Amino acid sequence: MKVLIVECDNNLGGLWQGHLERAGMVVSRVADQGRAIAYLSSFDVDVIIMNLVIGEGSALAIADYASYRHPDARIIFVTNTSFFSDGSIFSVASNACAFLPTRTPPDDLTAMVEHHGHKDEHMGPAPA
């Protein structure tokens, strides 16, 4: 499974990446919109883990581009704010499959990636 992490906190992104790689996933990590768009322009991805608040650019712009370029890719949004806490992220980003606090244990995040990134050859991505 191919995972892209969009996170500007190097320590947090590194923690997630280590857990995902130990679970056998191929993980790349970027910190901003420009690098995320460049990555998505060149490489396939099954799941994107993305902080809703990134240092440079817009997470929603990345989600929009991903829905165009990789329509089967699922996005797990993470945040440490209450923005979108009403669940409206799912109506704003059609490819959103989860919305988690940044303090979610890495093992739980890995389980979410495994669940939402699992694809059946004939059915597309697992339902949300």
Image (tube, rainbow, N blue to C red):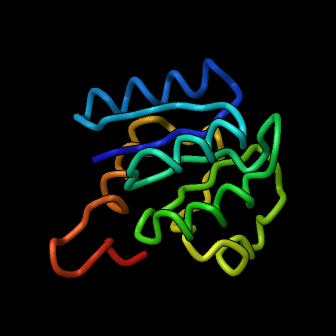
- Residue visible at 53% across and 39% down in the picture: 5
Q: Residue 43 location, x and y as percent? A: 42, 45
Q: Position of residue 102 (x, y in %)?
A: 65, 41
Q: Which residue extends farthest front? A: 42
Task: Give the quadrant of the C terminus.
Answer: bottom left
In this rendering, the count of numbered labels is 0
- Say which of 99 and 57 sits in front: 57
Pick whichever, 73 or 69, lies toward us: 69
Quadrant for residue 57, please give it: top right
* Depicted 65 relative to depicted 16: above or below: below
Seen in the picture, residue 94 relative to 115 is either above or below; the reply is: below
Residue sitting at the far top:
11
Residue 67, quarter of picture: bottom right
37 is higher (above) or lower (below) than 96: above
- 50 on left or right of 17: right
Nearest the eye: 33 or 78: 33
